Image (tube, rainbow, N blue to C red):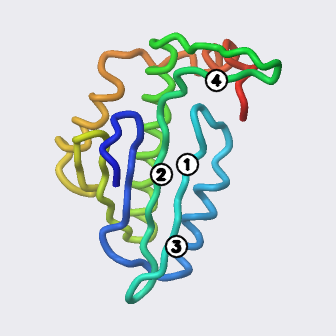
Amino acid sequence: MEANPEVLWFRSREAVAGEVAGQVVKEAAAQGRIWAAPLYVLSPAAFGGRHLIGHQLLYLREYETAKGRFHTVDPMDDRAMACIWLRRDLESLAGWNRRFGARWDLQLGLLRAQLPGSPDEVTRIERAVCGAVQSNGVDAVDRRYDDRPR
């Protein structure tokens, strides 16, 4: 995992069954709306099954439009969307834990947590991204940047 404060990295703490890994990879790939980048999940072979390793770029910052112009994202909009995507990812990881028993190591920048684990560790990661940001108005923010690549 990489110590990048703009990317949530995660990996399963133990190997999971091949069917479980396939289902997690499939569900991650099927997630619809994208802000900065899709949720990537890989499942390399491991002793006793497969590991799950993935990451999610949370911030868009800027992008090139189809017309070849660069568009800078307002930092508050970017942070609000990063917060929404982080929470969506944490919800997905928690759901995969409940359904399949997959336990996760998380990293955002220098912050690390386990899920399930200490709620304080996960809260620190969430606070680092979300702070006091208001995450209402996703559709309005999405519309302001509707010329971004998807």
Q: Which mark is residue 39?
A: 1
What is the distance, in whole Å, between disc 1 and disc 2 at their CAs?
10 Å
Per the image, the residue denoted by label 3 is 21
Residue at (41% x, 82% y) in the render: 46
Disc nearest the viewer among 4 and 1: 4
Q: Earlier in the sequence, mark 3 or mark 2?
A: 3
Q: Is residue 43 left or right of residue 10?
A: right
Name the kind of residue labelled 2 in the image: Ser
In the picture of the structure, the residue carrying the numbered disc 4 is: 63
Label 2 crowd (10 A; few <14 / some 14-19 / many >=20): some
Report the mark closest to the observer, 4 or 2. Answer: 4
Q: CA distance from mark 3 to mark 2?
A: 14 Å
Quadrant in which the N terminus is drawn: bottom left
Looking at the picture, tell me which residue is in the foreground, 3 or 68. 68
Decide: is 33 above or below 64.
below
Q: Mark 4: which amino acid?
A: Tyr
- Disc number for residue 92: 2
Residue at image position (52%, 75%) is 20
Crowding at mark 4 (Cα within 10 Å: few <14, some 14-19, many 20+):
some
